[in-house]
Image (tube, rainbow, N blue to C red):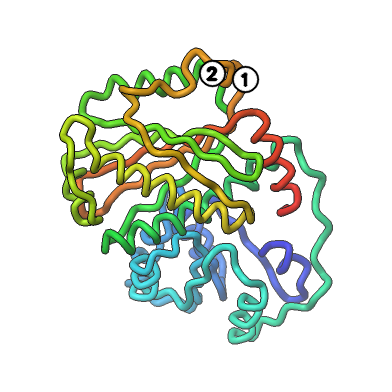
């Protein structure tokens, strides 16, 4: 969006890192249009809309978010947003919206891109993962019938020692159940760890249409974990244009992920996030881990998306 709008005659752009800074910017400048994300640190987009709902301001607010849950869209409009623009946005759609405000975008004025840093592919993949999380949350929300709190994904490289510590932390949480599930596709292969906790796990499962079969193996937890992993991979597959297949999830106490194997002797590419059910006592931590060969595939793909 900044590439499209930078350099346009008569336009002044302001950028802020979170909702709190956004409100401060609005108080200092006469802003015509504000593009507002929903999932942000410090103060999210819903909180910004609530803070502005009682104010008389002329700023038109356009939501630009990966959170495409129906409930999220409805809340934004109810709180005063003019339009909801899902990520990744369609440039033609954006231009048509701006035209309604008398803002006309000339073509061919996008500035050249700055040189890329070696780790810029991580930031690019973080946005890809963010979009996948939003679509995954929408899939889960449609099944569940209620709003799922959208997380900020943490995309990073993880060494073997950090992985072992993460697994130990999961195993030591007596009130949680951890599931491991392997996946592969397009030269990318790895494993997902899913940790469910909260007193309403069974309630969530039953509302999703899952049933408890074996209290020791916790079939309902395995079904929920499978949904969490597959919903993310389906959305990721759409963006990267590669199909993923997954193996049957396994309770972590029965199967130690990558333990004492060659796979954990090198750095891993990881995506970590937490889904929360707004109306229930339920949290779901998910950690995707991919090996070094998968990292190279991801890096090449992100360079084509840049």
Q: Is 111 above or below relative to 129?
A: below
Q: Where is residue 186 in the image (x, y as percent from the top left)?
A: 64, 45
* Residue 160, numbered label: 2
Q: In the displayed structure, does residue 118 sit left or right of residue 265?
A: right
Along the line of sight, which residue is nearer the eye, 302 or 44? 302
Q: Residue at x 75, y 35 (%)?
A: 118
Q: Which residue is drawn at 30% across and 40% down?
A: 222
Q: Residues within 10 Å of mark 1 (few under 14, many from 20)?
A: few
Query: Quadrant of the rendered structure where residue 248 is?
Result: top left
- Residue on which the image places disc 1: 266
Number of residue marks: 2
Along the line of sight, which residue is nearer the eye, 273 or 235? 235
Q: Which residue is drawn at 71% across and 54% down?
A: 305
Q: Is 219 above or below relative to 26?
A: above
Q: In the displayed structure, does residue 201 sit left or right of residue 17?
A: left
Q: Do the residues labelled 2 and 1 touch (CB within 8 Å)?
A: yes
Along the line of sight, which residue is nearer the eye, 264 or 254? 254
Q: Position of residue 144 (x, y in %)?
A: 27, 59
Q: In the displayed structure, does residue 214 sit left or right of residue 3?
A: left
Q: Which residue is drawn at 26% across and 53% down?
A: 278
Mark 1 lies on a secondary structure that is loop
Q: Position of residue 34 (x, y in %)?
A: 54, 69
Along the line of sight, which residue is nearer the eye, 199 or 97? 199
């Amino acid at each position: 969006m900044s590439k499209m709008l930078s350099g346009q005659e008569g336009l002044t752009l302001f950028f802020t890192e979170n909702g709190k800074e956004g409100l401060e910017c609005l108080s200092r400048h006469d802003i015509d249009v504000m593009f507002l994300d929903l999932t942000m640190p410090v103060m999210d987009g819903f909180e910004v809309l609530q803070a502005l709902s009682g104010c008389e301001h002329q700023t038109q607010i356009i939501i630009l978010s990966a959170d495409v849950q129906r409930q999220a869209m409805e809340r934004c409009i109810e709180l005063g947003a003019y339009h909801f623009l899902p990520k990744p946005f369609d440039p033609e759609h954006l231009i048509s919206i701006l035209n309604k405000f008398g803002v006309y975008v000339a073509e061919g004025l996008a500035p050249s891109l700055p040189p890329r840093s070696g780790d810029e592919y991580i930031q690019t993949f973080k946005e890809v993962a963010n979009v996948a999380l939003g679509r995954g949350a929408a899939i889960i929300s449609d099944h569940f019938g209620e709003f799922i709190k959208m997380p900020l994904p943490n995309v990073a490289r993880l060494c073997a020692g950090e992985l072992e510590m993460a697994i130990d932390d999961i195993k030591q949480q007596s009130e949680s159940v951890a599931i491991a599930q392997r996946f592969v596709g397009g030269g990318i292969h790895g494993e997902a760890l899913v940790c469910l906790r909260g007193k309403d796990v069974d309630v969530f499962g039953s509302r999703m249409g899952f049933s408890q079969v074996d209290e020791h193996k916790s079939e309902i937890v395995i079904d929920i974990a499978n949904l969490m992993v597959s919903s993310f991979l389906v959305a990721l597959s759409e963006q990267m244009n590669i199909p993923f297949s997954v193996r049957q999830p396994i309770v972590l106490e029965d199967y130690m992920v990558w333990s004492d194997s060659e796979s954990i002797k090198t750095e891993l590419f990881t995506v970590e996030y937490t889904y929360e059910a707004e109306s229930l006592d339920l949290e779901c931590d998910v950690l995707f881990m991919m090996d070094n060969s998968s990292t190279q595939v991801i890096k090449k793909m992100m360079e084509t998306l840049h």
